[in-house]
Amino acid sequence: MSDDLTLEDVSRIIEMAWEDRTPFEAIETGYGLQEKDVIGLMRRQLKPGSFRLWRKRVTGRTTKHARLRPEGVTRAYCPTQYKHR
């Protein structure tokens, strides 16, 4: 894992990892962390029970891997997720 991540970066990576529609490839593109690195970061940063819950949630989830997504789905978030108020 990159040592030059700020606390804000770590926070955003954790947020992206929890999001259902954000694939690991988006995290790798933005922060240079492969899926195994994200798993390691989550293991270190989350409480053990939260980590187990997260792993259960993302394991096998097709939206977390770009190659498993249905054809035509290219976005990393829901269209209504970042509405301007």
Image (cartoon, grey):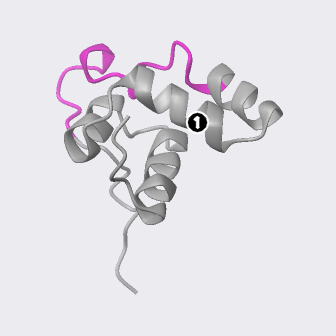
x 32%, y 40%: residue: 27
At 39% from the left and 24% from the top, the residue drawn is 35
- Which residue is under mark 1? 42
Left of 19 or right of it: where is 71? Answer: left
Magenta residue check for 84: no
Q: Is residue 66 left or right of residue 39?
A: left
On the image, the x and y values in percent for residue 21 come to 41, 39
In terms of depth relative to the viewer, which is nearer, 61 or 78? 61
Give the residue at the far bottom of this rendering.
Answer: 85
| Residue range (magenta) | 57-74
Q: Hey, what amino acid is under mark 1? A: Met
Going by the picture, which residue comes out furthest to the front? Answer: 3
- Residue at left 34%, top 81%? 84
Task: Answer with the quarter of the image where residue 34 lies.
Answer: top left
**Which residue is pictured at 79% across the width and 32% down the height?**
48
Residue projecting furthest to the right: 49
Q: Counting other residues with Cα less than 10 Å from the Cα at mark 1, is it few (<14), some (14-19), or many (20 or more)?
A: many
